[in-house]
Amino acid sequence: MTPSRIDFRIIADWIRPQSRVLDLGCGDGSLLDYLARSKGVNGYGLEIDDAHVGMCIKRGVNVIQTDLDAGLSEFDERSFDFVILSLTLQAVKYPDRLLREMLRVGTEGIVTFPNFGHWRTRWQLGLLGRMPISPALPHEWYNTPNIHLCTLRDFAKLCRDENIEVLESQVVDHAHRQRLGFRLFPNMLGEIALYRFRRAALP
Amino acid sequence: MKAIPPDSVGLVTPARLQFSEPLALSSGGVLTDYDLVYETYGALNAEASNAVLICHALSGSHHVAGYHSLEDSKPGWWEQHVGPGKSIDSRRFFIVACNNLGSCFGSTGPASQNPATGRPYGPDFPMVTVRDWVESQARLADRLGIRRWAAVIGGSLGGMQALQWAIDYPERVRHAVIIAAAPKLTAQNIAFNEVARQAILTDPDFHEGRFYDHGTEPRRGLRLARMLGHITYLSDDIMREKFGRDLRGGKLNFDYQVAFEIESYLRHQADSFVGRFDANTYLLMTKALDYFDPAGATEGDLARALSGIKADTLVLSFTSDWRFAPARSREIVKALHDNDLNVSYAEITASHGHDAFLMRIPRYVDILTAYMDRVASGADA
């Protein structure tokens, strides 16, 4: 499989070969499948959706059907090298709790989320006075599964508050491409944010 | 029956093998000589790498699929999932289904003749455990030339055997499929079994298990045991859906005959069980369930009990199953991923209760089929 999605490639670059990985909200298992092939990782995907669970099993990806909002209590501390939460943070009931859980069961966390600070979002809300709809956030306000949207700055602040050390971050557009200017103005131009982080050493 | 459906394995004939090497049992007892009755569907390939073992539950048998004769009104108990083109495809796999020791469907059990006395074993038939069954099935595999199962599959008590296989013979199980099972029974589960046993044991026709000698059987006890069992195999929802408070004759009769449809259903189930099932076997099977506890050998640490497993595993549960609830399956899943083993788990939405594992539920079929595709492709995930 060729990594057509740059977010997959960025995540793969961040992950050490042969790591143990837990993918929260693993969807159809394509990321885990890609990481297994490109990096030799092994691990599990957690997924609530019936159809997605079936697709994972077809693909040969280990999947455990579960509700992330119920927590990760069945996983012991430090069971994984990486815990990934890809485009799911904004859809869970307790993002802060889940981040803490990620760093309990894993050494490092990787989170990707749609950036609510993107200029198009700001334009729609700030000037047009409408809830934003964009390729990265395609739902109407009344049917969106995205209940906890945030900007890059918001996420960085949550990390500081939670004593989480950000190791790397990147932004891409909704087609998962990188463009000129993303480095300079990530919170304005980036549509999807990717973060790698770990528990900060206690001061 | 008029014609056999094309997606059935068709007419099948059970086979019987005699074993004369003594089988040491968990109880300390020994079976010196015993028969195993089994059925097979499909063909074993040249490498003997496509063999699948299907383990049966409490009242099941080796008759998993197909028909014994054209007069049979019903096919085997897992016809829904086993046959050409079905989830467990007899065109791809050599499917073996063994009747467990202690059963009343052909393999040596309490109703069989005790060579020491020339009379039926009755209560002298030793208690058998899930481990003992696995041991006897391993000997059957040896005789059939099967070194390693592509998969060992079972629902309920059958799922427990699949798990035990993976524990006891890690090199001989490539995949385990554990459906609607539990790593051990809860107090509530044991309680139901104990009521069922008491119904049999206190029936005056039980004669301490020697009812064969009296030309009778504890019909009342067995009927009650079966009725109680059936209540626990169904969910409250499906009972409401199927029977509700519907009246058999449309009105209340103010007597103790059948008034409600649910009473009629339970009586029918009980009637069709008696004469077909042996009371001593029922006692044995429920004890095998109660005693099953692989973590018993590891101070209750299930992860440690499962640490030697090499098989990849699929665990399935059903939302409305309260006899072996999804949470119980999750205990198995946790113990497997604690050992970094390849495991997948799906919770199938179904209103049928524990019995759902016997049903043809589209999502259940899809997932089982997808997983068996993997088994067939030889991929170890």
Image: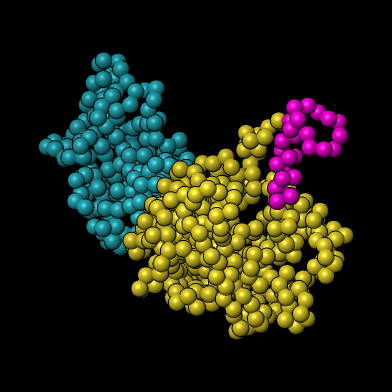
Chain colours: A cyan, B yellow
Please indicate, yes or no, whether residue B174 appears anywhere in the rendered image: no
Could you say where residue B105 lies in the image, as x and y percent from the top left? 64, 64
Quarter of the rendering containing residue B120: bottom right
In the displayed structure, B95 sits above or below B83; it is below
Residue occupying the point 53% across, 75% down: B140
- The residue closer to the viewer here, B172 or A190, is B172
Tally of numbered tags: 0
Residue occupying the point 70% across, 59% down: B277
Direction from residue B115 to residue B374 in the image, left or right: left
Residue occupying the point 36% across, 23% down: A141
Q: Is residue B268 magenta?
A: yes
Could you say where residue A48 lies in the image, as x and y percent from the top left? 44, 42
Q: Which residues are magenta?
A: B247-272
Quarter of the rendering containing residue A16: bottom left
Quarter of the image with the C terminus of chain B is bottom left
In the displayed structure, B9 sits above or below B262; it is below
In the displayed structure, A12 sits above or below B243; it is below
Quarter of the rendering containing residue B38: bottom right
Q: Is residue B44 magenta?
A: no
Direction from residue A14 to residue B336 in the image, left or right: right
Could you say where residue A102 lies in the image, as x and y percent from the top left? 41, 49
Could you say where residue B129 lies in the image, as x and y percent from the top left? 65, 69
